[in-house]
Amino acid sequence: MPISVWGLAIAQALLTTGNILLVAVSALIGKQLASHPALITLPVALQFLGLVMATLPAAHLMQKMGRKVGFILGNCIGLVGTWVALQGLEANSLMHFASGTFLIGMAIGTGQQYRFAALDVCSVEQRPRAISMVMAGGILAAILGPNLAIWSRQWYDGNVFVGAFYGLFVIYVLALLLISSLPLAVPAKSTVARVTRSYRELFQQPLLVAAIASGAIGYAVMVLLMTATPIAMQNDDFPFKNIAWVIQWHVLGMYVPSFFTGGLIRRYSSRRVILWGCAVLALCVLVNVLGNSYWHYLLGLLLLGVGWNFTYIGATHLLTFTYEPAEQGKVQGINEFMVFTAAAMGSLLAGVGVDKLGWTWLNLVSLPPIIFVAWWILHLADHRARVREKK
C-alpha cells in the first residue's frame, strides 16, 4: 500500500479526533449558551452547514489544483475557526461560538476528501482496502478524542470547555504539517479538460442514487442519535465522564470494523454490506428504546457506529463505479454535499427532538429512513450495475 495512504490514515485520525472532541462538547456548550432549547444544537448544525458548503468547492478545487492545496487550505480554515470559537466561549456568545464551528465545519468538509485521495494512488483492486485503512485511522481518534475532552476540562479555570479548543488548535497544526509533507497525486490535465455528463445524466444511474441515499441516510441517522445522546444522558444525570466513555465506544464502533469492512466488500459486495449496516442501525434503535441505563446508551451507540461504518464505507465503494475519471470531482462533490446536508439536518433536529419528542420517540422516527435504504438497495433494478459492482 502506498505511503500516502498511511499518511492519509493518520490525517484522518487527527481530523476524527477533532470531530469527536466537538461531539463531546458542542451540544453541551450550546445548552450552556442557548436562550431556547431549539438553539442548543445550533453550533453543531452550523458546523454541518459549513461542512456542506465546503464539499462541492473542495472537490472541484482539488480536481483542478490537487489534493495537497485543498487539504492545506482546509486545515488553515480550521485554525481560524478554532480561534473564533474560543473568542465566542470567552464572550459567552452562542452566535460567536457557532460562527467558529461553522468555519471548523468547512475544514472538516475538506477533510472528508481524505478517503477519495487514497483512491487516487491505488489500483481498482486496492480500493476497498485503501478506504478501510483511511477510515481505520479513526480508531486512534476513538482513544484520543473522548480522553482529550476529559483532560482538557482542567486546562482552563474560567470555562471547562475552553481547553478543548486549544487542543483542537494543536490538532489542526499537526494535520497541516503532515499534509504538507505527503506526496499526493496531482490532477491530470487530460481528464480535467474532458467533457463530463450533466447532473441529470449522472442521476439517471440507479447505482448512483443508491450510493448517495445509503451514505446520506446512514450518516443522518448516526449524527441525529450521536448528537442527541450527550443531551439525553445529561438529562438523565449522568456525569460528563460517562458521556465521554459512551462517545468513545461509539467511535470505536465507527472505525474498528474498518479493518475488515473492505474484505467483506470484496467477498460479498458493497450492496450486501450496506444491508448489514441497515440491520445494525435498526438493532441500535431497538436497544435505545428498551431502556436508558448507562449500558443501554453504551451498547446503542456502539451499534450505531458499526451500522454507520457498513453503510458509509459500502456507499463510498459503490460510488466509485458511477463516474469516469473526468467526472470524479463532480460526483464526489455532489455526493458529499447531499450526505452532509442530510447530516446537518440530523444535527439540527437532535436538540429539539430530545426536548419535544423524548429519547424513545426520537429513536423510533429514525427507523423509517433506515428501512427505506434497505428496501432501495434490495430492489436496485439495474442488473448490469450489480454485475459491474461485483467485479
Image: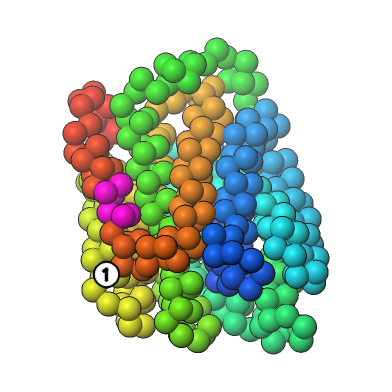
The answer to which image quadrant residue 254 occupies is bottom left
The answer to which image quadrant residue 296 occupies is bottom left
Q: Quick check: 159 left or right of 246? A: right
Kind of residue at badge 1: Val
Q: Is residue 369 magenta?
A: yes
Q: Colour mode? A: rainbow
Q: Which is more toward the observer, 98 or 48?
A: 98
Q: Quick check: 157 left or right of 232? A: right
Q: Residue drawn 62% across and 52% down? A: 46
Query: Measured along the vertical axis of the image, is residue 236 above or below residue 209?
Result: below
- Number of residues whose C-alpha sits closer than 10 Å to that of mark 1, classed few (under 14), some (14–19) or many (20 or more): some
Task: Name the residue beneath numbered marker 1.
Answer: 289
x, y percent for residue 160: 68, 81
Residue that extends furthest to the top in the rendered view of this protein: 195
Q: Which is more toward the observer, 187 or 281?
A: 281
Q: Which residues are magenta?
A: 365-370
Q: Is residue 305 visible in this depiction of the protein? A: no
x, y percent for residue 314: 34, 46
Q: Residue drawn 32% across and 30% down? A: 207
Dominant SS in magenta: helix
